[in-house]
Amino acid sequence: MKRTVNFKTLSSPWVLLWTLFLLNSACQPGNSLPEADPDNGGLFLPDGFEAVVVVDSIGRARHLTVNDNGDIYVKLRVPNEQGQGIVALRDTDANGKADLIETFGDYPDTGNYGTGMEIYNGYLYFSTAGEVYRTRLDPEKLVPEGEVELIMKDDYKNAEYGYEHIAKPIAFDGEGNMYVPFGSPGDVCQEFNRRPGAPGMDPCPQLEWHGGIWRFDANKLNQTQQDGYRYATGIRSVVAMDWNKEENSLYVVQHGRDNLHRTWPEMYSRWESALLPSEEFFKVEDGTDGGWPYYYYDHMREKKLLNPEYGGDKEKDTGADAVEAPLLGFPGHFAPNDLYFYQGDQFPERYKNGAFIAFHGSTIRGPYPQGGYFVGFVPFADGKPSGPWEVFADGFAQLDTIVNTGDAAARPMGISMGPDGSLYVTESVQGKVWRIFYKGDKSAFGDEALAKLETRKNTRTNIKDPDEELDNLEKGLLETGAQTYNIYCATCHQANGKGDGTRFPPLAGTEWVTGNRGESKRKLIGLLLNGLEGQIEVNGVAYNGIMPAHSFLSDAEVAGVLTYVRKSFGNNASSISATEVAQVRRELK
């Protein structure tokens, strides 16, 4: 709230003191906070914290930053229909909701992976998959009107190895330097990327231009990667990165490698592959070597181990003492996508200088529940974690058991802080932005306020470690699916799924059944719900018959039978969840 005082009208010291008291009160964090949404925008928070949805559905939001005047800038993963990739938000009536929403962005947007968004020295810096740009901010205007300048362009060195981890978050120190990661072009530096059992290249040639963090002059235009300085190496993929002002140092949380079971099934079980390798939290200094691709971290054993591509057997740690150990390891595939060290004074003291991490959520934890989809917190002291990681905000997914990534209503992505110490969080499905603030008694905040979140940590399937037997989702789905199949499907398609060769098609090895893209799965669900009449072609053979509608089956039964079919008869496709079935059923109405 802005107050104007004419001191010439003050007639007594008491009036002056009262006026100064009012001015001071208006500046206190808790006095200008908006009313929270009745349900905190769907979020579960520690006691005393509340939240309001600033804006909904602005597009696939990535990182964000907040200006000193409270204006919010959000980077979209892909530009909108007008070719603009940045959303600017302003709340003019202090109710917590954005009432001015503008999109802008007159710049080439390479690829489809825009991420970075930071304010530095009066400029708005932002990144695409291939460039880092900046434009000067005008405090009087929501949308910058100045020229967009190219700071750094990825010149795609080493392109023969491909490009997978191309997100370019950005961070700045206090000396005019900008830090940009260049992720690994594959999984673990194999000559034949992601081929089961294929050895890793040793030494790994990809490390010359990838798998590390480069430092650039934040004010120099038209740089390429070759103009930068390789500040750190052996870091596979970074989206979560922040400069810790208290420690004057860079910190990152790395995405670990993928699919240990798929590539080494004789060595790693599906349960081990769901939990490993850890997502590693590093302090990054000049010359840091995080150990990729030679090593991975096992947070359950608290040690670095050799990757199997380099002779590892789940026990060998030869040479691991020569690479950087993480400060902390998180369960595998949580997908840490932003990191923010809290500098404000609004929150209770225990949060000061601690690390908030947005866990975007896993995609490859099946047959166990997908994990992540929450904002975590790590308390810090003397530049390192001072306690175990905690759950700070949960409820983004709007359901407990997440079978497939697409089931989640929201996936937390970006974190930033407003001028009053409020925390802002984006999500990447529809593009919602939350503002989280504290209205409780800071002096009374303690373990009791955290208790319900600690309970969630140990009970919610998206957070807790899955039980190897009880939490195997396919076990239940396949049992239900087999029963439904035998009742409704086996008569025509046969118990072995091979069909009868004339009227009823086989269910094995056909895109009708095994397509994993979202549209393919929706088509299959719709086919079962609505039935099919007329001629179709399956694996080059024409079939002309009638498949009756099965919309009388429950969502769980449809999900079960389709999962059974997609996992049986030699098929190896992903599961289908009841949430996906319910969504298609709604679309068909």
Image: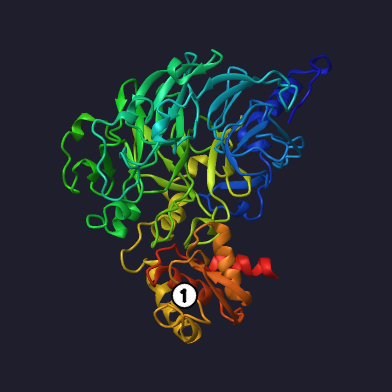
Q: Label 1: few (<14), some or many (≥20) within 10 Å? A: many
Rendered location of residue 367, percent (x, y)? 38, 63
x, y percentage for residue 274? Answer: 35, 55
Name the residue located 42 percent from the left edge and 79 percent from the top edge: 482
Would you say residue 194 is visible in this rendering? yes
Which image quarter holds the C terminus? Answer: bottom right
Residue 438 visible to an observer of this rendering: no
Three-letter amino acid code at the position of disc 1: Pro
Residue nearest the observer in this picture, 379 or 516: 516
x and y percent of residue 219 in the render?
55, 13
Identify the element where label 1 is drawn.
Answer: loop
Front residue of 7/496: it is 496
- Kindly indicate the quadrant of the structure image that contains residue 546: bottom right
Within the image, what quadrant is residue 14 found in? Answer: top right
Tell me: 6 left or right of 164.
right
Which residue is the site of mark 1?
A: 506
Q: How many marks?
A: 1
- Judging depth in this view, the residue of 98 and 493 nearest the camera is 493
The N terminus, quarter of image: top right
Q: Looking at the image, what colour scheme do you see?
A: rainbow
Picture coordinates of residue 509, whole percent (x, y): 43, 66
Instruction: From this view, report whether residue 137 is shown above or below residue 356.
Output: above
| Relative to 15, 408 lies left or right | left
- Taking 540 as reference, is 54 above or below it? above
Q: Residue 471, relative to residue 132: is it above or below? A: below
